[in-house]
């Protein structure tokens, strides 16, 4: 029986193998019948736009055009590695090892990675690098979507011409990331059609993605033991069940209908089946965890700058990865995409490395295998040659321009995103997001615009096309402290909301909400603890509507002003006003005080304003019916009428101040609207004083200052050399000089020099006489006090005398020398004047 059973099991296994082989043959036949249709129109358009074979390579360095001995050896190792790989894995695609560069020279892919750290803070993080590469370059699809390219230009050339395919994008992004300290790798693999073709029409714009709100579970109230029982429900339970059943059926029908509509929309938006699914070649970047505090490994698509998890379904497989140090081949099965892949590059079972000199730690092996491995490393050790690419340099202008020709358009699901370079638009517009209602992008729902470098500090504007509501957002620094402005029209006394930076305002105003009938203001950080003011307006008279000037007498008639205050801890609760209402038409003032501790009601007081004179002409000061008070928890008698009268006078004065502040608020609104209209019409942009290229005013001012300083220096040099300049200025115009003027000029110059010589001699003589007199006085004092002097005093005196004698001797020598030299200097100046070309023809003097 056992023999028969084993025989049957063998027959069943043979049948299974036969069935599997038949299925494989059928699959091969079906795959061979599939015809790959490549959209030639799209590729031809890109090829017509740019031809890589026509670029100028004459100015490129020699490393771009030739291979060093070490690079040639590396290419031989790569060919040997590829032969072994093809022999061991004949069903795998050829490896992407040494494509040609822009000069037609084969270069190993790892040597094309040039790690470079850029001087811009925005390019120090991975998201900034990815966004720059995505914005700066123009995407070119692969010539064949199912095979890697045969050429790979250097990152510097890709930056120069601002275009490249997915492999060029990845090499450039990987170079920037490694330079910034990330553990980044270029990936050669397979992805979906949307990723390979940069098709984001089915993706939601990142600017519209809202963070998922955390739903809080409702807290169940605890049933109290001694709670009052609710009243008995006398309604018919049967009728209630029938009503609930009908509502449930209606709700279920609505949900079913909604679900069917959503399924129809999803079916309509569902992309058509891709005949090349799983075969499309794509390159992206892998960032491993560890360096730069990256907690988890992730992918970066260089086309869109989006990050994805390593288990994302858009990525269908990996052939190989590389960086500037080594090259690894994936030996893991990708039947489930990249979801089951392990990125432990030190595991030689899962990742086959090409060079032994890798910084990734290998798995621990027995001692014998380690010894053999060490011997192999000694025999076959080879370091990766240095990159043949020049350092990646991005100028400030290129970094700011970003997009090709300064503009880029990205189409998302029911949205369109437009980007511009700074200063390209006269109004400072750098980004615009248009949201549509329909997938065809015809009916506009909302428009968001972002601005930079505006003088009015506006950084964003949002327009809702359905409600026609516009919201403008401002950075700190606006002339009125404006933070946000929401409105439908710029006409005054219409519905609008203004938010302010309260810390920049004296009154602490945070928000102002206004319409035709009321105005609400919110404050914070005020010394009087006011935090809320609500004003109700009445209708204007016909005469007031015709007046154009907004004066306090022409302001909107105020019906009521309500003010609320925070608690002032320095006052008792029943004397600290919490709410104050001025009922102007009714001539009443209502006060509500803060609640005391352990009380649920608050004290209140109401004042009724009356005329100062009654019907008989008698003056009314205060009566008991003019103030109605309610005090909580106090047994003290009410205040006297005099105190109440003084309080009412203060409240009437506060009412005047509040009405004046409301008028000032209305005036401020009109002023802000006027300023905003002028700013919107001008749309002036600010330029930093450090921006030497765009700041024309500063540049012209600097050039003018340099020119004036150069002229001043030249004029000063000329004046220093021209000894006749002071005398020529005194004479005025000297273009034509007479003989008398020349003689006068000569005499003036000689007399001035003579006076200066005499003054110098007198100065030396005066100093000589002064020193001599001081020495004589010291000698007299010494003779008078010689007997009472100590040795220390005598030493000090001798030191002083020696110094004074030395100074006198020097002055005497200088005076004698000056007397000897002065006549000679005088004669030399006279001869110089006679030889001067401006005076020689008049003086007729020959030396």
Image (tube, rainbow, N blue to C red):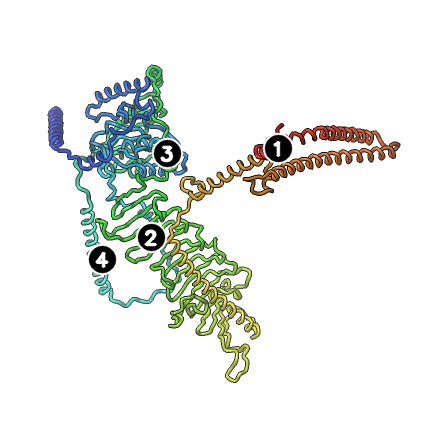
Question: From mark 1 to mark 3, how far is it between C-alphas?
Answer: 64 Å
On screen, 773 above or below 412?
above
* Residue corresponding to mark 3: 394
Identify the mark nearer the N-term, 1 or 3.
Answer: 3
Task: Residue at 36%, 57% (x, y): give it.
Answer: 486
Question: From mark 1 to mark 2, how far is it between C-alphas?
Answer: 81 Å
* Horizontal side, residue 739 vs residue 71: left or right: right
Callout 4: few (<14), some (14-19), or many (20+) C-alpha neighbours within 10 Å?
A: few
Identify the mark nearer the N-term, 2 or 3.
Answer: 3
Identify the mark nearer the N-term, 1 or 2.
Answer: 2
* Residue corresponding to mark 1: 833
* Residue corresponding to mark 2: 462
Q: Quadrant of residue 355?
A: top left
* Residue corresponding to mark 4: 251
Callout 2: few (<14), some (14-19), or many (20+) C-alpha neighbours within 10 Å?
A: some
Q: Secondary structure at mark 1?
A: helix
Instruction: Work out which quarter of the rendered image holds the N terminus and state it.
Output: top left
Identify the mark nearer the N-term, 2 or 4.
Answer: 4
The number of numbered badges drawn on the structure is 4
Question: From mark 2 to mark 3, how far is it between C-alphas?
Answer: 33 Å
Q: Secondary structure at mark 2?
A: strand
- What is the x, y in percent for residue 760? 70, 35
In-front residue for pair 477/526: 477
Task: Residue at 32%, 19% (x, y): give it.
Answer: 68
Q: Secondary structure at mark 3?
A: loop
Of the two numbered discs 4 and 3 in the rendering, the one whose residue sits closer to the viewer: 3
On screen, 412 above or below 620?
above
Task: Residue at 58%, 43% (x, y): give it.
Answer: 732
Question: From mark 4 to mark 3, how far is it between C-alphas?
Answer: 60 Å
Question: From mark 4 to mark 1, how far is it between C-alphas?
Answer: 117 Å
- What is the x, y in percent for residue 295? 37, 36
């Amino acid at each position: 029986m056992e023999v028969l059973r084993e025989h049957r099991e063998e027959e069943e296994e043979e049948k299974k193998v036969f069935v599997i082989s038949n299925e494989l043959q059928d699959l091969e036949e079906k795959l061979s019948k599939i015809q790959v249709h490549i959209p030639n129109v799209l590729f031809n358009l890109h090829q017509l736009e740019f031809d890589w074979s026509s670029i100028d390579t004459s100015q490129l360095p020699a490393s771009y055009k030739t291979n060093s001995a070490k690079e040639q050896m590396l290419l031989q190792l790569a060919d040997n590695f590829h032969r072994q790989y093809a022999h061991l894995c004949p069903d795998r695609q050829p490896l992407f090892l040494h494509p040609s560069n822009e000069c037609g020279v084969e270069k190993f892919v790892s040597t094309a990675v040039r790690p470079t750290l850029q001087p811009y803070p925005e390019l120090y993080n991975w998201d900034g690098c990815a966004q720059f590469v995505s914005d700066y370059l123009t995407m070119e699809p692969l010539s064949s979507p199912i095979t890697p390219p045969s050429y790979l230009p250097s990152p510097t050339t890709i930056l120069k011409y601002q275009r490249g395919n997915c492999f060029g994008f990845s090499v450039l992004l990987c170079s920037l990331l490694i330079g910034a300290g990330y553990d980044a790798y270029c990936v050669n693999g397979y992805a979906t059609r949307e990723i390979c073709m940069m098709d984001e029409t089915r993706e939601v714009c990142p600017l519209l993605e809202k963070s998922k709100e955390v739903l809080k579970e409702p807290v169940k109230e605890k049933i109290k033991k001694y709670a009052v029982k609710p009243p008995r429900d006398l309604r018919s339970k049967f009728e209630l069940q029938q009503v609930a059943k009908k509502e449930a059926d209606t709700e279920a029908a609505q949900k079913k209908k909604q679900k069917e509509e959503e399924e129809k929309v999803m079916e309509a938006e569902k992309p058509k089946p891709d005949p090349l699914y799983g075969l499309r070649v794509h390159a992206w970047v892998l960032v491993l965890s560890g360096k730069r505090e990256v907690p988890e490994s992730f992918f970066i698509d260089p086309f869109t700058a989006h990050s994805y998890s390593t288990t994302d379904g858009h990525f269908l497989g990996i052939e190989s990865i590389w960086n500037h140090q080594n090259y690894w081949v994936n030996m893991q099965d990708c039947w489930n995409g990249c979801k089951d892949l392990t990125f432990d590059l030190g595991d030689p079972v899962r990742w086959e490395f090409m060079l032994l000199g890798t910084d990734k730690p290998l798995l621990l092996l027995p001692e014998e295998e380690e010894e053999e491995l060490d011997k192999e490393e000694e025999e076959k050790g080879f370091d990766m040659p240095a990159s043949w690419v020049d350092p990646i340099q991005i100028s400030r202008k290129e970094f700011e321009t970003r997009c090709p020709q300064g503009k880029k358009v990205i189409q998302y699901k029911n949205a369109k995103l437009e980007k511009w370079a700074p200063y390209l638009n006269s109004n400072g517009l750098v980004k615009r997001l248009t949201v549509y209602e329909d997938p065809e992008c015809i009916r506009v729902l909302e428009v968001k615009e972002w601005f930079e470098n505006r003088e009015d500090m506006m950084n964003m504007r949002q327009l809702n096309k359905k409600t026609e509501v516009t919201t403008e957002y401002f950075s700190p620094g606006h002339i009125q402290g404006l933070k946000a402005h929401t409105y439908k029209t710029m006409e005054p006394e219409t519905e609008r909301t203004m938010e302010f930076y309260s810390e920049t305002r004296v009154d602490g105003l945070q928000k102002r909400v206004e319409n035709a009938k009321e105005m609400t203001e919110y404050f914070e950080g005020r010394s009087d603890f006011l935090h809320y003011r609500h004003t109700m307006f009445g209708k204007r008279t016909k005469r007031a509507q015709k007046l154009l000037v907004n004066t306090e007498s022409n302001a909107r008639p105020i019906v009521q002003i309500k003010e609320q205050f925070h608690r002032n801890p320095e006052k008792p609760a029943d004397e600290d006003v919490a709410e104050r209402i001025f009922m102007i038409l009714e001539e009443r003032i209502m006060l509500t005080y803060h609640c005391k501790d352990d009380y649920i009601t608050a004290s209140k007081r109401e004042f009724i304003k009356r005329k100062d004179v009654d019907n008989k002409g008698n003056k009314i000061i205060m009566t008991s019916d003019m103030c109605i008070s309610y005090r909580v928890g106090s047994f003290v008698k009410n205040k006297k009428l005099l105190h109440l009268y003084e309080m009412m006078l203060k409240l009437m004065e506060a009412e005047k101040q509040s009405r004046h502040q409301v008028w000032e608020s209305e005036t401020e609104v009109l002023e802000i609207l006027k300023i905003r209209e002028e700013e919107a019409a001008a749309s002036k942009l600010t330029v930093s004083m450090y921006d030497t290229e765009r700041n024309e005013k500063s540049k012209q001012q600097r050039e003018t200052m340099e020119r004036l300083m150069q002229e001043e220096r030249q004029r000063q040099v000329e004046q220093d050399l021209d000894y006749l300049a002071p005398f020529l200025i005194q004479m005025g115009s000297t273009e034509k000089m007479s003989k008398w003027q020349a003689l006068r000029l000569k005499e003036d110059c000689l007399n001035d020099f003579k006076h200066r010589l005499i003054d110098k001699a007198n100065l030396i003589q005066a100093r000589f006489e002064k020193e001599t007199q001081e020495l004589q006085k010291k000698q007299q004092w010494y003779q008078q006090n010689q007997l009472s002097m100590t040795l220390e005093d005598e030493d000090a005196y001798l030191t002083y005398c020696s110094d004074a004698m030395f100074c006198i001797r020097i002055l005497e020598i200088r005076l004698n020398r000056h007397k000897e030299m002065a006549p000679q200097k005088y004669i030399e100046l006279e001869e110089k004047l006679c030889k001067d070309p401006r005076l020689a023809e008049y003086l007729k003097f020959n030396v």
